[in-house]
Amino acid sequence: MTIADGLIISATLLGPIFAVQATRYLDDQKEKRGRKLQVFKTLMATRSYTLSQKHVEALNRIDLEFSSEKPKEKKVIEVWRQYLDILSEKIQSPEQWALRRRDLLVDLLHAMGQCLGYDFDKTQIKNATYSPVAHGRIEEEQQAMRNLTLELLDGKRALSMFITNLPTNSPPKSEVR
């Protein structure tokens, strides 16, 4: 057997193995990117509804899907840590906190977009979102109802009652003869 024959046999045997391994590697990379895209798309879609369950879940997946070990993703992790830090901060006034929180969310979404190949500018991320006024009003009303219900249950508020149409002691007309 010649060297050429040995190479042909080796290529015949090892070729499919290398092809399968290459396919698995590419599939893994595609899946990882897909998970990162899902986090980004969820955060973009819910950026006006930061209290929504989907938004919070997507934020909590950032550490799982992005890595500070990869140069392109390091900025995402840095901005995420800044954002997470302000989310738990209670020192600033509510107005200052809300402005800073919004700016850091925009920075986070911008960093994620750049990492994933999207070309959004920060102004577009901040302003190009639709949030109906009615949604905000409904949320405020629901919060007010929760607060009033808790006050009632805690005994801090009384429940007003008005009695109307008191029954009379006279027998019904069908019984009178």
Image (cartoon, rainbow, N blue to C red):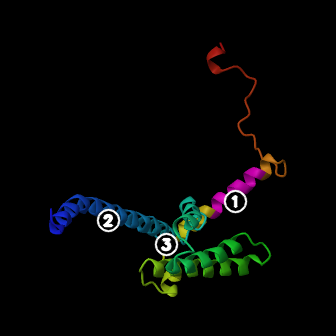
Nearer the observer: mark 3 or 2; the answer is 2
Instruction: Give residue 165's position: percent from left, percent from top.
Output: 70, 36
In the picture as drawn, the residue positioned furthest to the top comes out as 177
Q: Nearer the viewer, residue 139 or 67?
A: 67
Residue 174 locus on image (x, y percent): 61, 17
Q: Secondary structure at mark 3?
A: helix
Q: Which residues are magenta?
A: 140-150
Residue 144: image tag:
1
Query: Helix, strand or loop at disc 1?
Result: helix
| Element at label 2 | helix
Q: Residue furthest right?
A: 156
Q: Amino acid at mark 2?
A: Ala
Q: Which residue is mark 2?
A: 22
Seen from the viewer's position, the closer of residues 101 and 168 is: 101
* 150 horizontally vs 106: left or right: right
Q: Residue at x 16, y 68 (%)?
A: 4
Q: Give the residue type that dot 1 points to.
A: Ala
Q: Residue at x 53, y 61 (%)?
A: 54
Q: Is residue 117 visible?
A: yes
Earlier sequence position, callout 3 versus callout 2: 2
Q: Is residue 77 above or below residue 162?
A: below
- Provide residue 26's location: percent of width, then percent of height: 34, 66
